[in-house]
């Protein structure tokens, strides 16, 4: 029986429902930009940076064209380049390691913890050792707050201090989440985030931001995003890039930030409903270290080779799923020649074969979730 053909299709993330909610506020915000025509670094960019700094508690917010650029700008501002090693998880989106190679440094992979999906601080010393053995200078570490779950920032800070590493938090998926009752954006020396549409705080295209309390790094970031400008754009004091958040996107983000706390609450309610209904049949994600998540993804683990059975059942019932990430970076063609920490990356390998993410957004209703949670149950009973 093919029930799902009569049921409405389920979106994996629901930008349309959010658009409906925001309604004319977005249209009016964009129209204001079209009226004043300051499309590059217009007044909305500055206003959004100020609001975002107040929201997350960072002293400086410097917006830019994407999350990937935010990471590149941060690494450049931190003075990282050829001969330097930067430690990052193998179980993450490729941009985390890509940016390290883009600035001429070398990524060194470290394993993650299976409950948080994030860097296991116990592996950091082994990654530093692997970097030194490869003749590199260990300079920094990039923890990722994967799926919206904060990394163990306290343990990472302790290990980073012991090894003399700078910390760049890749909060592209976790921005808005809290760790130890503080919002991400204030952990480590620098934090980078993304506003690409699919992220919890997404705009209508690409965008990103870098956050820091360090005045010198903030100055360097503002210079780097405009071709390394000095006193003006035609005074070039360093090699930079062209990477600004469009004024139109800043206008969109100002409106979206107003409903972001409410959306985070809705995501947390949806995550709790999933966990209540699925915790007895699969491994559900948990927040730890006194943290809260923004649930960029709601990712379950299905052991013993049964992940694909679950994926097939959901697909047959018209429920979209995604596998983030099917291949850990140390096994990707572009990254497999980079060093791996001494402790190995076995958890990353296992997660890649067991994770599956379910539809998650702030507009997920109870009836839809009921439909979704029944499918893995049915698949695992077979
Ligand atoms: C999305 C993402 C990025 C890159 O963001 P873009 O805005 O797409 O460039 C970087 N790191 C992680 C972990 C991400 O999920």
Image: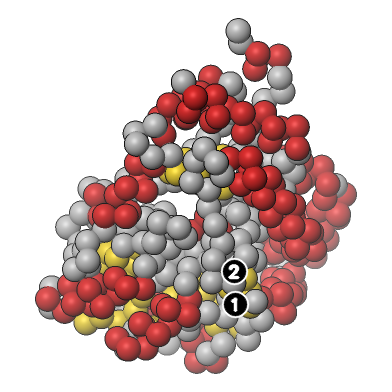
> Which of 343/106 is in front?
343
Q: Quadrant of residue 228?
A: bottom left
Asked if residue 267 is positioned above or below residue 128 in the image, the reply reads above
**Residue at the image position 41 percent from the left and 78 percent from the top:** 156
For the residue with label 2, is its CB less than 8 Å from the closest atom of ligand 1? no
Q: Residues within 10 Å of mark 2 (few under 14, many from 20)?
A: some
Q: What element carries label 1?
A: loop
**Residue at the image position 22 percent from the left and 61 percent from the top:** 344
> Which of 169/204 is in front?
169
Left/right of residue 128 with respect to residue 50 in the rendered view: left
> Which of 154/54 is in front?
154
- Please say whether residue 96 is visible from this viewpoint: no
Discs 2, 1 touching: Cβ within 8 Å? yes
Q: Residue 234's spot in the image, x, y percent? A: 50, 82
Q: Which residue occupies the extreme top position in the image?
A: 1
**Residue at the image position 54 percent from the left and 57 percent from the top:** 286
Picture disc at residue 232:
none
Asked if residue 373 is positioned above or below residue 325 in the image, the reply reads above
Picture disc at residue 180:
1
Q: Residue 53's spot in the image, x, y percent? A: 67, 78
**Residue at the image position 46 percent from the left and 20 percent from the top:** 382
Q: Quadrant of the image for the N terminus?
A: top right
Q: Residue 280's spot in the image, x, y percent? A: 55, 41
Give the alpha-carbon distance from disc 2 to disc 1, as whole Å: 6 Å
> Which of 323/95 is in front?
323
Residue at label 2? 291
Q: How crowded is mark 1: few (under 14 residues within 10 Å), some or many (20 or more)?
A: some
């Amino acid at each position: 029986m093919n029930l799902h053909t009569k049921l409405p299709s389920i979106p994996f993330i629901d930008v349309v429902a959010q658009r409906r909610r925001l309604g004319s506020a977005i249209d009016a915000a964009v129209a204001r930009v079209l009226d004043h025509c300051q499309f590059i670094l217009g007044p909305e960019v500055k206003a959004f940076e100020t609001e975002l700094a107040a929201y997350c508690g960072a002293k400086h917010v410097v917006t830019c064209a994407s999350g990937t650029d935010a990471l590149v700008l941060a690494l450049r501002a931190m003075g990282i380049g050829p001969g330097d090693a930067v430690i990052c998880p193998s179980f993450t989106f490729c941009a985390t390691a890509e940016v390290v190679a883009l600035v001429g440094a070398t990524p060194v992979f470290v394993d993650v913890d299976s409950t948080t999906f994030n860097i296991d601080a116990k592996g950091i010393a082994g990654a530093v050792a692997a970097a030194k053995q490869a003749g590199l200078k260990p300079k920094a570490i990039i923890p990722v707050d994967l799926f919206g779950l904060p990394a163990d920032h306290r343990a990472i800070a302790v290990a980073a201090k012991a090894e003399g590493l700078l910390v760049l938090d890749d909060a592209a998926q976790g921005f808005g989440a809290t760790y130890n009752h503080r919002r991400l954006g204030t952990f480590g020396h620098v934090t980078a985030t993304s506003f690409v549409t699919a992220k919890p705080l997404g705009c209508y295209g690409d965008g990103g931001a870098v956050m820091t309390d360090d005045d010198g790094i903030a100055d360097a970031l503002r210079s780097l995003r405009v071709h390394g400008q000095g006193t003006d754009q035609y005074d070039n004091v360093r090699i930079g890039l062209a990477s600004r958040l469009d004024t139109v996107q800043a206008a969109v983000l100002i409106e979206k930030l107003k409903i972001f706390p409410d959306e985070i609450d809705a995501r947390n309610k949806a995550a709790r409903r999933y966990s209540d209904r699925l915790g007895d049949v699969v491994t559900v994600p948990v927040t730890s270290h006194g943290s809260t998540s923004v649930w960029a993804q709601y990712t379950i683990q299905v052991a013993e080779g049964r992940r694909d059975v679950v994926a097939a059942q959901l697909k047959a019932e018209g429920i979209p799923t995604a596998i983030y990430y099917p291949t850990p970076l140390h096994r990707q063609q572009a990254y497999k020649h980079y060093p791996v920490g001494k402790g190995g990356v076995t958890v990353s390998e296992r997660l890649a074969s067991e994770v599956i993410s379910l539809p998650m957004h702030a507009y997920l209703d109870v009836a839809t979730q009921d439909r979704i949670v029944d499918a893995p149950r049915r698949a695992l009973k077979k």
